[in-house]
């Protein structure tokens, strides 16, 4: 079947803050040799209606703030000539987009109309079950962090080291 993205200039990779999990980050670190902060960031949470179970609580100057783990985006540094250069090991959220965790095409997706229709016809990417599993593990890690808390730098170290130990995905 036709690739729905073939006639699109990767609007999603250029315009969204791409939230990932620490398992995605570790996989990308291992495959590219890049350090965590070269491509990932704990982004201060500015979005409403966000998945609260993936919100990381960290201290800055004695006060508590909320963050989400994301790719350094706009544009994503892995986007080359409007195509993903790490497609085979990209964050699972990228691989299932524009489908959501529930398998539905997201309302308000940036895909052109024809691409959107094709995605609906094709159904979700086969990595969806793996994405659900990964997200479940990541939510547990986030809860573990939020019970202990610390600075942003400590949080990044915690996520990477715990994800490496769990070693899945
Ligand atoms: S990792 Fe690939 S698919 Fe995901 S935002 Fe970056 S370029 Fe796009
Ligand atoms: S997922 Fe949608 S917005 Fe992203 S590249 Fe494909 S068609 Fe374009």
Image (cartoon, rainbow, N blue to C red):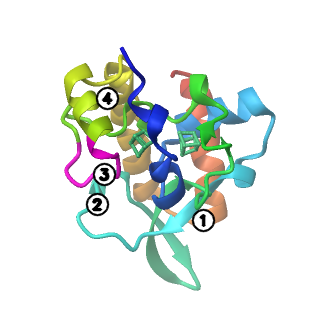
The residue carrying mark 3 is 53
Residue 132 numbered mark, or none: 4
Name the residue located 67 percent from the left edge and 33 percent from the top edge. Answer: 85
Structural distance between the alpha carbons of marks 2 and 1: 19 Å
Near mark 1 (Cα within 10 A), the count class, few <14, some 14-19 or many ≥20, is many
Secondary structure found at label 1: helix
Name the residue located 79 percent from the left edge and 41 percent from the top edge. Answer: 34
Secondary structure found at label 2: loop
Residue 169 numbered mark, or none: none
Residues shaded magenta? 106-113
Residue 152 numbered mark, or none: 1
Near mark 2 (Cα within 10 A), the count class, few <14, some 14-19 or many ≥20, is few
Indicate yes or no: mark 3 CB to ligand 1 under 8 Å: no
Name the residue located 26 percent from the left edge and 35 percent from the top edge. Answer: 101
Structural distance between the alpha carbons of marks 4 and 3: 13 Å
Name the residue located 71 percent from the left edge and 36 percent from the top edge. Answer: 29
Residue 50 numbered mark, or none: 2
How far across and down, in percent of the image, does residue 158 sit?
60, 48
Structural distance between the alpha carbons of marks 1 and 3: 17 Å
Near mark 4 (Cα within 10 A), the count class, few <14, some 14-19 or many ≥20, is some
Select label 3 or label 2 by which is in front.
2
- Asked whether the residues under the numbered discs 1 and 3 touch, taking CB atoms below 8 Å apart as contact, a structural biologist would say no
């Amino acid at each position: 079947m036709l690739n729905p993205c073939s006639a699109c200039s990767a609007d999603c990779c250029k315009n969204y803050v791409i939230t990932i999990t620490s398992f995605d980050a570790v996989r990308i670190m291992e495959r590219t040799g890049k350090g965590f902060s070269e491509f990932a960031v704990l982004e201060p949470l500015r979005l409403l209606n966000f998945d609260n179970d993936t919100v990381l609580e960290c201290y800055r100057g004695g006060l508590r703030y909320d963050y989400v783990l994301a790719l350094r985006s706009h544009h994503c540094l892995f986007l080359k000539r409007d195509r993903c250069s790490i497609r085979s090991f990209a964050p699972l959220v990228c691989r299932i987009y524009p489908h959501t965790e529930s398998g539905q095409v997201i309302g308000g997706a940036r895909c052109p109309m024809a691409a959107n229709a094709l995605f609906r016809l094709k159904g979700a990417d086969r990595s969806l079950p793996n994405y659900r599993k990964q997200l479940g593990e990541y939510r547990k890690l986030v809860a573990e962090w939020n019970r202990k808390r610390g600075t942003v730098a400590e949080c990044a170290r915690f996520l990477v080291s715990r994800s490496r130990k769990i070693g899945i995905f």
